[in-house]
Image: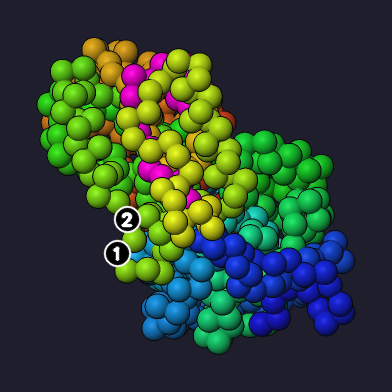
Amino acid sequence: MKIGPGDEPHEQISVLNPADGSIIGEVPAGTRQDADNAVLLAREAFSSWSRTDATNRSKILFTSAERVRADQKELAVLLTREQGKPIRESMNEIAGFARVLEYYASISGSLPGDYGKSSSYGHMVVARQPLGVCAAIIPWNMPALIMAWKIGPVLATGNTMVLKPSKTAPLTCIALAGHLSASGLPEDVLKIVTGTGEVIGKSLATHPDIRSLSFTGSVDTGIRVASLAAPTLKKTILELGGSDAMIVCHDADLKAAAKGAVSGRFFNCGQTCTAIKRVFVHEQIAGSFINEIKELTSRFKIGNGLESGVDMGPLHTRRQRDLVHEIVRNTIDSDMGQVLTGGVLSDAGSLNSGNFYMPTILTDVDPDAPVMKEEVFGPVLPVTTFSTLDEAIDHANATRFGLGSSVWTHDARTISRAIEELNAGIIWVNQHLRIPPEVPFGGMKSSGIGRENGRNALLSYLEEKTILINP
C-alpha cells in the first residue's frame, strides 16, 4: 500500500514528542495534486473492491485486527511518542482499533436488501450498494481509534477511502495502514495523504469524486468543512466535540462518582471529546465529593507517557497548553471560580521541557462562566453545586454542545428524567466516557451531524436503489 505523496520532493512536516519537544519523525506536506491522485487511485480500486464478496472483505479485516493485536506494544509506544498519552492508554487504544475492525468484519454481510410485493406495483426491491470513494479527516487526540471508526464501516461495505490524519500525529495511522496492506487489503483501497488541513483537508472536502466525508474536530473547522463540501452534495458526517456534564445526585455512590469524575476528566490529559468537562454535584454531598476528587488527583504521577506508573502525560501541543492555562486564569481573575488544586504549567524539573499542565480542579464555579459553557480540551475539572434536579438539568443543557452527559444516582425516577430531558447524543448512568463500537456515537446541537459506529454506520456508506418490477 502506497502511503502519502509520490516520489517527487516534498516539504516535510516534523512530528514532535509532546513530552520533550524532540522530533520523532517526518511526513510529506502533501499538495492538492497528491490528494487528487489519491482519489483517482481509490476510484479505480473501487470497481474491484466493491465487487469483492463480503466474506472476503471480512477476512481481511479480521486478519488486520489479528496483526495489530500482535504488534500492540510497538504501536502503542509509537502512539505515546507522537501523541503524549500514557502507554497504558495507548495500549487500550490500539486494542480498541482492533476491536472496531473485528466488529465491522463480523457484521459486514448482515445488511441484505428489502423485498415486498404489491398488487398495485408488483415486486418491490430495495438494493443497497456502496457509494464509491469516501474520505475522512481525523484529529490527533485519539488517532488510532478514530481511524478505525472511519475506515471500519467504509471498507466493510465495499467502499474505498482516502484518509487525512492530523499533521501532528500521523505516524500511528500510517503504521496501522501498513498492517491492513500486509493483511491483504488491495492496493489503493485505503489511501493516506499527509499534510495540512488547509491543503489536503480542503482538497478532499471540495473534490467532486468523493461521495462521503467524515470529519472529527472543532466546531469552527467543521462548519468550514461542511461549507466546502456542500457544493458537491457529498454526504457529510461531523463530530465536533462537546462539553459533557456530570450530574452527581445526593444518593450517588460517592467513591464511584469521584473515581468516575477523575478518570473521565483526566484521561488522555482531558483531550477527549466525551470527557467530563463540567460537574454539577448536589449541595448535600459537595464537600465530601470534592475532598474525594482532590485526594484521587493528588496521587497522580505526571510525566512522559513511556515512564512506568505515569497517570497523565502532557498536552499535545504547547499552544493547547497555553490556551488551557489562559482559560483557568481568566476564570479566577473574573471571580467566576477558585483553584482547589493545580492551575500551574508544571511542578518544575523535567516537566518544563514538555507541554505539561497539572491536573486542575476549580470549585465554586459560576454556571455561566466560559469554562462551563465551552469545550476546554485539557485537564481542568470545574465543579459547582445544585439544589434541585431541575436546576442541574437546566445547567447541563445550557451550552451549545450536546455530545454526552452522565447522571450518578440510584433513583429510578431521576434516571428516567435525566434520560428524557438531557440534550445529548449519549447518556450514561453511573459511568462516563466508555463507548463500545456496537452503539451509535454522535451528538446534538453544535456537537455535530450524523452518527458513527453501530450497525447503522454501515447504512451511512450504502446507497439505496429502489426497483419496481411489473411481473
Image height of 451 relative to 455, above or below: above
- Please give left or right for residue 324 compared with residue 385 in the image: right
Please state which of residues 248 and 149 is positioned toward the viewer in this rendering.
248
Residue 342 in percent (x, y) is at 38, 38
Q: Is residue 371 magenta?
A: yes
- Can the viewer see residue 105 in this picture? no
Q: Foreground residue, 422 or 19?
A: 19
Q: CA distance from mark 1 to mark 2?
A: 7 Å
* Mark linked to residue 6: none
Residue, x 27% and y 16% (percent of image)?
Answer: 386
Please state which of residues 351 and 2 is positioned toward the viewer in this rendering: 351
Residue depicted at x 34% and y 65%: 88
Quadrant in which the C terminus is drawn? bottom right
Residue 353 shows up from this direction: yes
Which residue lies under the disc numbered 2?
Answer: 301
* Dot 2 amino acid type: Lys
Quadrant in the picture for residue 418? top left
Range shown magenta: 356-372
Direction from residue 382 to residue 84 in the image, left or right? right
